[in-house]
Image: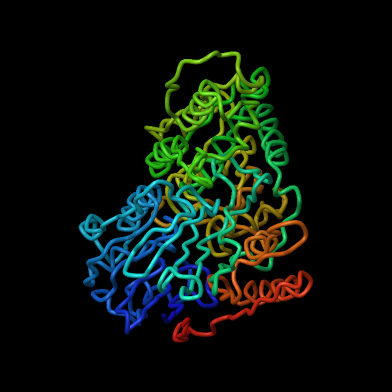
Amino acid sequence: MKMQNVGPIGKVTGSCTWLFDEERKWSFLIDCGMQQGEFTEKDWNQGLYWPFKPSEIQFVILTHAHIDHCGLIPLLYKKGFKGRVICTQETADLAKILLKDAVNLGAVYSNADIKAINWSEPNGIGLMGKFHPIGQDLFLRFYRTNHLIGAVSAAIYWGKPIPGQQKSIVFSGDIGPCMEDQEYLPFNRHVMIPGDKQPFNYAVIESTYGGVVREADLTCCMSRYARIKELLDKILLTNGTLLLPSFSLGRAQDLLFDLHWVINSEPEKYGEIEILLDSPTARKINPIFIKAMQRTEVGGKGLKKVRPLWLGKQMFRWFDLDDCEPAHIDKMYDIIRQCLGAKPKHEYDPTIGNETAKNWKSRLTLVEKRAELFNQFNKPRVVVASSGSCDGGAVAQWLGTVLKSERNIVALTGYCSASSVGGQLHTLSEIETRERRRHSGVLSWDGQAQDVKIRDIQAEITSLRGYSGHADQKGLINWLFWKFKSEDWSKTASEVFIQHGDDRNRDKLESAIMEFSIAADCPVKVVKPSSSNNIFDLG
């Protein structure tokens, strides 16, 4: 088996790895994603860098639905690929929506190419951690990553299933931030550590935040709630609008949950605040989240345990609900439905759970006619609007009105590149309103009829942090090393390839891995591919 890390090398987006074995006639991909915001994206997104022939690829294993991992799969089909895309059902459902959005944004394929995709979830009892045959003496195992519903690490085994005759490699995909019993974001269950008593021969790990160690307040739900309360208190005083630019997948759903949590925890104080969701894509995604939260699987030794596939136990903890009691489980499902815009569906004792659970009701309005809402300032409201970078989408249309009034707040909810409108707003957040009056610049949005002069921006510009779906350096190390028993350290793999990150984060993660492996007496070889032309013989 040979491996070529096609992308990204020294970049964050455009995940694609080619595994092939000429003797065994294997040729398949792990992910095939778009580049976004990279200087090479124009050529990359036309498939000009592919070292393989799409017609000779047998299948694609897809780790999750983000466009930088799945965005060029329709182009594979357009160029002759005929195989299946192996992933979880949730990943398929989400990818169908995001890929159609990509067509509208100028992707070099059509809706017909998307319809041609043959989505395939592995069959059998139990999805996570189980062996799934995908070829002669070729096997696949999935491990949940906590990055997003549907997101998995993918482990490949090749050779006869006899001790000493198989080799293995695991691809991390994107790893989420929440380890078991340390969950602080809603909906998604903890990261699964891949492997058994014997480590994989190889691992390919992402390094998006390989050089970052987050502060404690960014890994605590109570810190998020406290910050939301601060912002809500301000708009209560001004009868203003809190505008939250948000990515439609993952971020929007987390925000809707947190806003409902804060308001339903103190309905006498915050009950008059209305939550508006203005994101056509998020509205399509919310039903997928609701369905996914109710999915269970049978697992454990001897297939004796039933567990939610994606719903984290932290949700039951937060509401004082018992995850073994059907009425409590139904209550949990309805809590999720209500904060994502659906009606409750179950009958149960309304007194179960804590006070927040008892007070829980939907505060959400789905925006239908946006223009009619722009100048309504008769009561405080929160608007969750796409997109997170503020370059387009619904939020770009809200900004022109919201930014001009001192009654309002714009709180950025995630990373924005410096060149994006969100990045420019972040810079302006550090300039006092009085100083902005001297500014001669203009804030512009593509496709919008009206720009905003910076001197006219009166709203408070700030941030609402703590929602990253990526593990930091500590989380990445935890994925590679863990205590199997007592004080003995185990490792995911004996040789680790660092991919999917800029060189600064790759370098810092490499140093951290080597330092930890020495301290734990758990030796690991680290490889940083220097070029997408590197080919590694895995044996």
Where's residue 145, x and y in %? Answer: 54, 54
Residue 292 in which image quadrant:
top left
Residue at 43% across, 42% down: 282
Where's residue 275, x and y in %? Answer: 53, 30
Q: Is residue 507 above or below residue 386?
A: below
**Number of marks in the rendered image:** 0
In the foreground, 346 or 324: 324
Q: Is residue 417 above or below residue 369?
A: below
Image position of 227 (left or right of 128): right
Residue at 63% across, 35% down: 407
Task: Give the quadrant of the N terminus.
Answer: bottom left
Where's residue 93, x and y in %? Answer: 35, 47
Residue 281 in which image quadrant:
top left
In the foreground, 369 or 257: 257
In the foreground, 113 or 233: 113
Residue at 59% across, 58% down: 424
Colour style of the rendered protein structure:
rainbow
Residue at 70% across, 48% down: 219
Q: Residue furthest front?
A: 162
Residue 227 in which image quadrant:
top right
Where's residue 121, x and y in %? Answer: 35, 52
In the foreground, 245 or 84: 84
